[in-house]
Image (cartoon, helix red, strand yellow):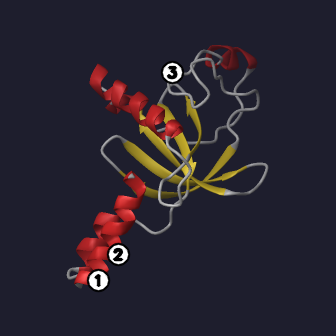
Amino acid sequence: MGNCCAAPKTSDENKKKNKPNPFSVHGGNFTIPDGGFKFYVLDELGRGEFGVTYLCTDKSSGELFACKSISKNKLRTSVDIEDVRREVEIMKHLPKHPNIVSIKDTYEDDNAVHIVMELCEGGELFDRIVSRGHYTERAAAAVTRTIVEVIQ
């Protein structure tokens, strides 16, 4: 599995990296800048069906982000690839909202597609609902209101 920061490659290896990135936040012509990724990987946050999410930090600002690294080996069909492209496309067009994760950047290497996004430390809503078990009507209304505000 790839990660969001790597040692700089030799000049011959960098040449093959400078190709259009179909997953790019900046459109199809974005390439990995000279010097490699702009983020350091710190810890693994979680695993999913297609990859791993890491805690990472911006090399210049120190700001924390989450980096979802999606293994290309797991993208077996054209539908899987299109789903990743669609996820990036949707995320880059979402409005700024306190309850919607924003995308920071994307990278692609030989092993994975990396989606760097805002870090949300509260966990999954589903997991919180399940762990709590029972909600009062007022608490359920508050959760529902938050969800509805996002989709308005």
Q: Position of residue 102 (x, y in %)?
A: 54, 48
In whole angstroms, how far apart are the C-alphas of marks 1 and 3?
45 Å
Q: Which amino acid type is marked by label 1? A: Arg
Q: Are marks 2 and 1 in contact (CB under 8 Å)?
A: yes
Q: Give the residue number, with chain letter if any, for mark 1.
A: 138
Q: Secondary structure at mark 1?
A: helix
Q: Position of residue 114 (x, y in %)?
A: 52, 37
Q: Are marks 1 and 3 in contact (CB under 8 Å)?
A: no
Among all residues in the image, which is located at the extreme right?
Answer: 60
Q: Which mark is residue 142?
A: 2
Q: Secondary structure at mark 2?
A: helix
Residue mark closest to the camera, 1 vs 3: 1
Q: Residue at x 67, y 37 (%)?
A: 37
Q: Which mark is residue 22?
A: 3
Q: Residue at x 30, y 20 (%)?
A: 78
Instruction: Tell which of 141 and 48 is nearer to you.
Output: 141
Q: Position of residue 70 (x, y in %)?
A: 42, 38
The answer, for residue 82, to whether it is visible in the render is yes
Q: Residue at x 42, y 28 (%)?
A: 85
Q: Earlier in the sequence, mark 1 or mark 3?
A: 3
Q: Quadrant of the N terminus?
A: top left
> Dot 1, how many residues are within 10 Å of its Cα: few (below 14), some (14-19), or many (20+)?
few
Q: Which amino acid type is marked by label 3? A: Pro
Among all residues in the image, which is located at the extreme left?
Answer: 134
In the image, 130: left or right of 120? left
Q: Residue at x 79, y 49 (%)?
A: 60
In whole angstroms, how far apart are the C-alphas of marks 2 and 1?
6 Å
